[in-house]
Image: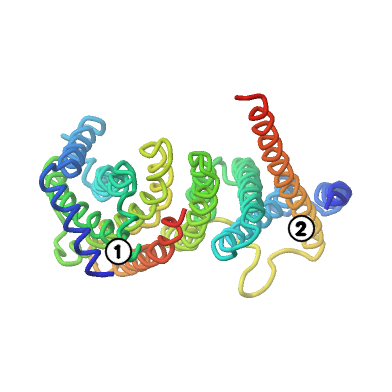
């Protein structure tokens, strides 16, 4: 199963490297969000600083959401030929999950410094904890996005339905990520620990549960 | 099951009598707290309906036979669950305006209920967007399972975030008088019986609708369409 997953991942990655159909629009969208924040909340003022964790994570979620929704859409448009391959169906989900995680990590790596610069907020001092926060938040979003992407790929109105399903679903993750990031700015960065655990639990559950259920989706 | 309806009516009359006339006013909240009986009954019924939706969705995936009928009830329980959640939110907001001075506060229960409401609206949206019946059954069942797992995590996260909602059941016992407890229980059964009746009615309606569509298709086929 792993071998097939790696090959499928490689297929999607080379597609993305050739066309850059996901990262480029999603990244540009993220930067546009940062700029719009500046306009909407008067970026010259200091008021944006305390809001920075929330603004950053909304930016990351909204732009990632553009990228993760497409992963299964590509296969749906290709007429589901992938299902004819003699491989474990779980491999398909794993490869899409890996692709989504990679894409969202790259997006986050670009957007986080960009948001900090444009909104005039310093990044937290606790670098390692901050990196963990980013990774846990992004992996969870990619996992939930893969699950919901798989569910909506076959529907009419795919692009319209996905945010309505995905964004309420990831609300605990958003709360965790924003609270953890905000805690890193406080005197005691260790208070972010609980939130990091919460995000880790979310990540674990929503990698495992959709992986177990994915088989059912491919049978109909 | 058709007799449920006749059980529901006297239960509602009894529940309304107990809640609005029989129990005394509350010391600090006065008359406004009486909405709480309706509120709590609906909230419990909503949770039960959505739990039933989870169990039925599990059955849709696991059992080989009777998928169509199980799915019908899964849809019905989700719809009734949403209806009850909406009523819970609405009654809670009215009470909140009187007791807290605001329609909405970001208390864990309110926030969790609102998110849950959106998640199950998503269930109906997903169903609506899937045309193929077999696919709709399985996809919505998978969605229902994933969402049901999410709800406790939502609650935990929002609870860590903040809290002001009154708690009726605590570790030390029940926070209300025996008289109030009786009214709560009667009202709970009234809403529960109503919800059951609605679920059966909805499933029946869906069955009829499908049968009509089938006959219509057959007839059109005979006419040469």
The residue lying at 48 percent from left, 54 percent from top is B143
Q: Nearer the viewer, residue A108 or A97?
A: A97
What kind of colouring is applied to the model shown? rainbow
Identify the residue at horizontal 50%, vertical 56% (top origin). Answer: B108
Residue B205 appears in view: yes
Report the label total: 2
Image quadrant where one finds the N terminus of chain A: bottom left
> To which chain does the residue with label 1 belong?
A
Q: Measuring from the top left, give residue B3's x and y in whole percent.
A: 87, 51
Residues beneath discs 1 and 2 located on the same chain: no
Query: What is the x, y in percent for residue A148?
Result: 39, 51
User: Which quarter of the figure has residue A65?
Assistant: top left
Q: Residue at x 22, y 52 (%)?
A: A104
In this rendering, is residue B110 above or below B176?
above
Placement of A83 over or under A62, stated as above or below: below
> Mark 1 falls on what kind of element?
helix
The residue lying toward the viewer, choosing from B140 and B43, is B140
Q: Which residue is mark 1?
A: A91
Q: Nearer the viewer, residue B196 or B206?
A: B206
Q: Is residue B67 left or right of residue A83?
A: right
Residue at image position (37%, 45%) is A153
Locate residue A81 relative to residue B18 in the image: left or right. Answer: left
Q: Tell us which disc is closer to us: 1 or 2.
A: 1
Q: Chain of mark 2?
A: B
Side of A175 relative to A38 (left or right): right
According to the picture, the residue beneath numbered tag 2 turns out to be B184
Secondary structure type for disc 2: helix
Asked if residue B70 lies left or right of residue B5, the reply is left
C-beta proximity under 8 Å, tags 1 and 2: no
């Amino acid at each position: 199963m792993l071998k097939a997953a790696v090959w499928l991942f490689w297929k999607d990655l080379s597609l993305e490297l050739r066309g850059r159909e996901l990262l480029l629009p999603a990244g540009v969208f993220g930067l546009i969000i940062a700029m719009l924040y500046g306009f909407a909340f008067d970026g010259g003022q200091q008021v944006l600083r305390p809001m920075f964790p929330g603004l950053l994570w909304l930016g990351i979620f909204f732009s990632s959401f553009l990228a993760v929704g497409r992963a299964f859409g590509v296969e749906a448009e290709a007429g589901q030929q992938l299902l004819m391959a003699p491989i474990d169906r779980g491999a398909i989900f794993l490869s899409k999950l890996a692709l989504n995680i990679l894409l969202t990590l790259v997006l986050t790596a670009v957007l986080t410094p960009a948001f900090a610069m444009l909104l005039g907020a310093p990044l937290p001092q606790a670098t390692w904890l901050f990196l963990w926060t980013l990774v846990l938040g992004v992996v969870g979003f990619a996992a939930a996005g893969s699950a919901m992407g798989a569910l909506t790929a076959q529907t009419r109105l795919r692009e319209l339905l996905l945010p309505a399903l995905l964004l309420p679903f990831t609300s605990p993750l958003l709360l965790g990520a924003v609270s953890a990031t905000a805690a890193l700015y406080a005197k005691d960065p260790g208070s972010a620990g609980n939130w990091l655990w919460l995000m880790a639990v979310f990540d674990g559950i929503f990698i495992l549960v959709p992986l177990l259920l994915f088989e059912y989706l491919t049978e109909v | 099951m058709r007799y449920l309806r006749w059980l529901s009516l006297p239960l509602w009359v009894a529940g309304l009598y107990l809640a609005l006339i029989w129990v005394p006013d509350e010391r600090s909240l006065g008359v406004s707290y009486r909405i709480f009986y309706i509120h709590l009954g609906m909230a419990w019924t909503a949770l039960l309906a959505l739990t039933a939706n989870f169990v039925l969705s599990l059955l849709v995936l696991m059992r080989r036979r009777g998928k169509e009928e199980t799915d019908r009830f899964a849809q019905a329980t989700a719809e009734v669950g949403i209806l009850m959640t909406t009523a819970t939110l609405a009654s809670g907001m009215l009470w909140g305006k009187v007791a807290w001075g605001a329609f909405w506060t970001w208390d864990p229960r309110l926030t969790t209920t609102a998110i849950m409401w959106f998640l199950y609206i998503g269930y109906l949206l997903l169903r609506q967007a899937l045309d193929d019946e077999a696919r709709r059954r399985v996809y919505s069942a998978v969605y229902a399972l994933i969402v049901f797992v999410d709800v406790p995590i939502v609650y935990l996260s929002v609870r860590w975030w903040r809290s002001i909602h009154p708690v009726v059941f605590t570790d030390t016992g029940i926070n209300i008088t025996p008289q109030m407890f009786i009214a709560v229980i009667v009202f709970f059964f009234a809403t529960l019986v109503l919800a059951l009746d609605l679920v059966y009615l909805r499933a029946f309606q869906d069955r009829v609708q499908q049968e009509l569509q089938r006959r219509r298709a057959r007839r059109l086929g005979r006419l040469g369409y």
